[in-house]
Image (cartoon, helix red, strand yellow):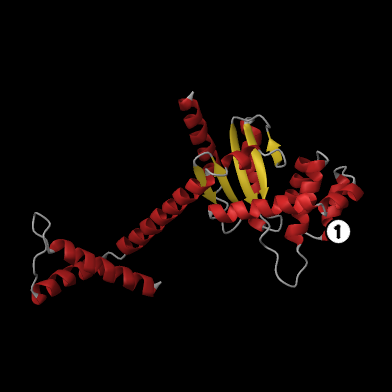
Amino acid sequence: MYKILSLALASILSYATAVTAQNSDHTPVVVPDNERAKIEQVIQDYLLTNPEILELALRELQRRRVDDQRTQMLDVAENYRGYLETNSNAGVLGNPKGDVTIVEFFDYQCGVCRRHFADVMRLVKEDGNIRWVARHFPILDRPGELPLSQISARAAIAAQKQGKFAAFHTEMMTSPGKVTIERIFKIAEDVGIDVTKMQADMDDVLTDKQITNGREIAIAIGFTGTPGYIIGKNILLGAEGYGAVKRAVEATRRKNAAKQ
């Protein structure tokens, strides 16, 4: 933190001195070294007396960088919006005919995804007109370990083929305990899935293709973790909470209404 603040201080001093050393027509003037030192000392004394300004500046810088990142991600996401929102192979929760679509990239081993599921589901139920599309982004598997993110994603796609995605997904997201092979198939059995057929569908080459497509699209857009959401012209990174999702839904609904 000290290093960051020192760099910020140096940058501010350099910038402020450069701005001070300009004529009214913005042409640079030569500032004697002794005068430059005085200017820098005044600025430094002020910043050291009011260090919270540096923290505010750093937070604002970070906010602008995140905003720029979201804008760039949205530009790419537009190329895939039709596929992401309407592809018939995707698992859907909420109202299938909802006027606003939430696209979520998630991983069943992601604890943050599971905790945030309750917030998003609460909004979906309260609103009643949201279509929530779940997109698999299994990225938490580690070399040398059982690929449970991949396996559970395959199981969910197989559940979708039996019309049981919503029930399976909800249980996977809300039931306690870590993801295990036993838990995956126990949940499948509990929600009425034909487990034998499910296992066959999990090995289908089209299942593998669906996961690969989803992962490649998520990476192309710029998602590096889970959960990640696309809601109209809004990108949410991580679990930003019930309020952030609601605001994004309302903003999207207003924009959609304005187009009509």
In this view, 5 is above or below 254: below
- Point 72% across, 52% down: residue: 209
- The answer to whether 191 appears left or right of 259 in the picture is right
Q: Specify the farthest residue to the top.
A: 260
Mark 1 Cα-neighbour bin, 10 Å: few <14, some 14–19, many ≥20: few
Residue 11 lies in quadrant: bottom left
Whether residue 112 sits left or right of residue 231 in the image: it is: right
Residue 226: x %, y % from top left: 61, 55
Front residue of this view, candidates 1 and 130: 130
- Residue ID at (89%, 49%): 195
Residue occupying the point 34% across, 58% down: 56
- The answer to whether residue 48 is visible is yes
Q: Where is residue 105 in the image (x, y as percent from the top left)?
A: 63, 50
- The answer to whether one can see residue 177 in this image is no
Q: How far from the left and from the top, in percent, is residue 173?
A: 72, 50
**Residue 118 shown left or right of residue 231 in the figure:** right
Count of numbered circles in the view:
1
- Residue under circle 1? 182
Please name the amino acid that badge 1 sits on. Answer: Glu
Residue 4: % across, % down: 37, 71
Quarter of the picture containing the N terminus is bottom left
Query: Closer to the camera, 215 or 179?
Result: 215
Q: Which residue is more in the foreground, 225 or 54? A: 225
Q: Is residue 45 above or below residue 24?
A: below
